Image (spheres, rainbow, N blue to C red):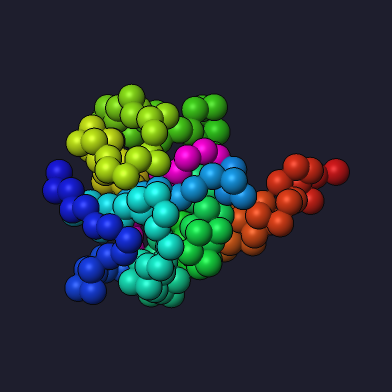
Amino acid sequence: MDIRLHTGDLPDDVAFGDSMAVDTETMGLNPHRDRLCLVQLSAGDGVCHLVHFPPGDPYDAPNLAALLVDPTVTKIFHFARFDMAILYAALGVLCRPVYCTKVASKLCRTNSERHGLKHLCDNLLGIDVSKEEQQSDWGEASLSDNQLAYAAQDVLHLHRLRDRLDQLLTREGRSEIARGCFEFLPTRALLDLGGWDHPDVLEH
């Protein structure tokens, strides 16, 4: 695993090809209240770029923002709904196009009620992913080596998960409905930010 840490933005010369795994670390799960602290990115090649936003950072990250909205690069998330909302709240960009491994799993793995990243990596890839640092303090001015390693692993396997889930979606005849869900996710994130998370406008 090759971890490359950046502060405030990506360098000008970083490229990810036609698909990029993305994750975030924040101070909590409320995008109206909680601060974006770290963005993790990987091309699925064993290299992870971490963009750290220390306390007081102005969130001026033009290189990162351009990648997140690049229509030629698919952004692969696990639970895209939250990550897209926090990225929009902090950086003012709405990611498109996107793929969500959690949504894909719920559509094709109806034999299971477990769709977390740790379970998917174990069940579909035979990889044990540690979650020990999940609730650590990501708001510090500098992050520990353990935090950086934890953050990196959350994107290193998403390309392989997407490939395996695509096989299952095809097998179950649900690829088209998955694409429809992925296309709706930017709107879902905006609904959450607008206050329509509870109650959900799609509920009765």
In-front residue for pair 201/9: 9
Identified at 75% across, 51% down, the residue is 196
Q: Is residue 44 left or right of residue 87?
A: left
Image quadrant in which you'd find residue 137: top left
Q: Which residue, as the protein is rendered here, is positioned at the far right?
A: 204
Q: Is residue 12 left or right of residue 34?
A: left
Which residues are drawn in magenta? 19-29
Q: Is residue 153 left or right of residue 173?
A: left
Q: Which residue, as the protein is rendered here, is positioned at the far front?
A: 56
State whether the magenta stretch is mostly helix, strand or loop. Answer: strand
Q: Which residue, as the protein is rendered here, is positioned at the far top?
A: 132
Identified at 35% across, 50% down, the residue is 54
Q: Is residue 35 left or right of residue 203?
A: left
Residue 192 locus on image (x, y percent) = 67, 51
Quadrant including the C terminus: top right
- Residue 202 belongs to the span the image colors magenta: no
Q: Count how many numbered circles sit on residues in the image.
A: 0
User: Does 65 appear above or below 47?
Assistant: below
Residue 74 locus on image (x, y percent) = 40, 64
Residue 149 locus on image (x, y percent) = 23, 38
In-front residue for pair 124/97: 97
User: Does 17 appear above or below 89?
Assistant: below
Residue 1 locus on image (x, y percent) = 15, 44
- Residue 21 belongs to the span the image colors magenta: yes
Identified at 73% across, 51% down, the residue is 195
Q: Which residue, as the protein is rendered here, is positioned at the far left?
A: 2
Let me know if residue 4 appears in the view.
Answer: yes
Let me know if residue 174 appears in the view.
Answer: no
Identified at 20% across, 36% down, the residue is 145
